[in-house]
Image (tube, helix red, strand yellow):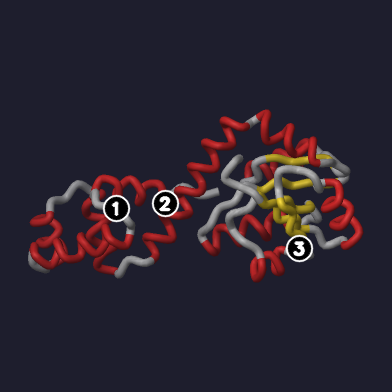
Amino acid sequence: MKRYKTISLIDADFRRRAEHSKALAGSSFHIEPFESVEEFRHQGRADTLILVHDDGTAVADILEDMRTRDYWSPVLGYGKILDPVRCSQIILQGLVGYLPDPFDRYDIEALLEGASEQLTKLIDLRFGAADARQKIKTLTKREAQVLERLQAGLTNREIADSLEISPRTVEIHRANMLRKMDTKSALTAIRMSVQAKITG
């Protein structure tokens, strides 16, 4: 969890938000409080650990925001009633954990440290998928078509024939695609394309 230095605390209740900000003081994280997912969307940063009060909609809202804007941050939910069914449902939707309310910094540290290896793998996977989707979005239609055909195992000549363009034009689109995806290898671009399909 060394990648994250900040906790974005999202809670509509002012007093509860202030209490949790105070309870988390002294932790290894800087705390940034937000009244709503909408406020976080406009003022928050994606490179944070997100702690969101489970008020019935906020959890779904933050997960939808991540899907819509193609970023990924680890999200912890918290609520007064620790309903195992509810916890299971929202963790399956994409949360990395759930805390009973009230909690303090030691509860968060224990949760994160207890699953450090698994969380690091999950974060790398989800962050990489979101990053790949962002890069793929920058491709032109033709560059995306070249990538799709490379993924299918076609050669430059076969790609040219399928798109009815010259092999030289394929090479230009391929070079542009690799530059935009920040890689020099077609194999890496193909892996990123596969990774981009990972959601959650």
Check disc 3 and report the residue beneath it. 34
Check disc 2 and report the residue beneath it. 196
* Real-space CA distance between mark 1 and mark 2, rounded to the nearest whole angstrom: 15 Å
User: Up-down: is 144 above or below 22?
Assistant: below
Residue 57 visible in the displayed image = no
The image's mark for residue 183 is 1
| Point 86% across, 51% down: residue | 22
Q: Secondary structure at mark 1?
A: loop
- Give residue 116's position: percent from left, percent from top: 61, 32
Q: Mark 2: few, some, or many residues within 10 Å (few <14, many ≥20)?
A: many
- Chain-order first, disc 1 or disc 3: 3
- Give residue 142's position: percent from left, percent from top: 24, 68
| Point 59% across, 41% down: residue | 2
* Real-space CA distance between mark 1 and mark 3, rounded to the nearest whole angstrom: 37 Å
- Chain-order first, disc 3 or disc 2: 3
Q: Quick one: which residue is furthest to the right in this view?
A: 15
- Chain-order first, disc 1 or disc 2: 1
| Point 54% across, 64% down: residue | 69
Q: In the rendered picture of this protein, how many numbered marks are placed on residues? A: 3
Q: Secondary structure at mark 3?
A: strand
Q: Mark 3: few, some, or many residues within 10 Å (few <14, many ≥20)?
A: many
User: Up-down: is 29 above or below 159?
Assistant: above
Q: Mark 1 or mark 2: which is in front?
A: 1
Q: Are marks 1 and 3 in contact (CB under 8 Å)?
A: no
